[in-house]
Amino acid sequence: MSDHAATTTAAAHDDSHGGHGELDMGHHHVSSSAMFFNVLLALLFLTFITVAVSRFDFGSMNMLIAMAIAAVKASLVIAFFMHVKWDTAINKIVFLSSFLFLSLLFVFTLADLLTRKLDGPMGGIKSPVDKAWVHPSATENH
């Protein structure tokens, strides 16, 4: 038997990956507790920043600032706690493409809202009622 055939046969019968019938699920990344602690500190710091920023009025930028901080926090959770940072490229592409389709949903919804006329029946200002409301039982004849 040649050296290549012997190596191939030995590798085929190697039981170091598990017993008979078990699937090899690929590489598993083992994270250190120090890395999780650092991510926790970063998330707590960003939460502190979120609360601090909420105390100031930035006008129309309030929502944008809050969403930017939330996106950074979500990215940390996705990358480290969901182990996407160490995942395969195709899984990263599929995961990130979901955000593309979510952004398209938001863009088309906002485009629809911004192109509607405000003077239609749903957007118009209603005139106030000229008299006070009276309960129907008060107007019944006994």
Image: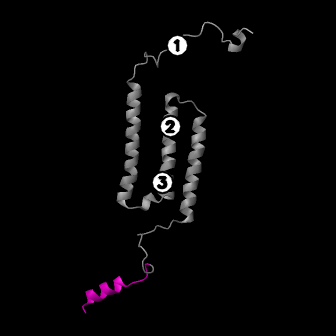
Give the residues in magenta: 1-17
Residue 109 x/y as whole percent: 40, 33
Q: Earlier in the sequence, mark 3 or mark 1?
A: 3
Task: Look at 47% across and 60% down and name the residue there.
Answer: 83
Q: Earlier in the sequence, mark 2 or mark 1?
A: 2
- Kindly indicate whether the residue at mark 1 contacts the one at mark 3 (C-beta within 8 angstroms): no
User: Which residue is situated farthest in the left direction here?
Assistant: 2
C-alpha separation, residue under disc 3 versus residue under disc 2: 20 Å
Q: How many neighbours does mark 1 have within 10 angstroms: few (below 14), some (14-19), or many (20 or more)?
A: few
Q: How many neighbours does mark 3 have within 10 angstroms: few (below 14), some (14-19), or many (20 or more)?
A: some
Give the number of the mark in front: 3 or 2: 3
- Which image quadrant is residue 117 in? top left
User: Which residue is situated farthest in the right direction here?
Assistant: 142
The residue at which mark 3 appears reads as 78
Residue 91 x/y as whole percent: 38, 58
Q: Is residue 67 above or below residue 117?
A: below
SS of the residue at dot 1?
A: loop
C-alpha separation, residue under disc 2 versus residue under disc 1: 34 Å
Give the number of the mark in front: 2 or 1: 1
Q: Which mark is residue 72?
A: none
The one of 108 and 57 positioned closer to us in this rendering: 108
The residue at which mark 1 appears reads as 126
Amino acid on which disc 1 is placed: Lys
Is any atom of residue 71 visible in this view?
A: yes
The residue at which mark 2 appears reads as 65
The quarter of the image holding the C terminus is top right
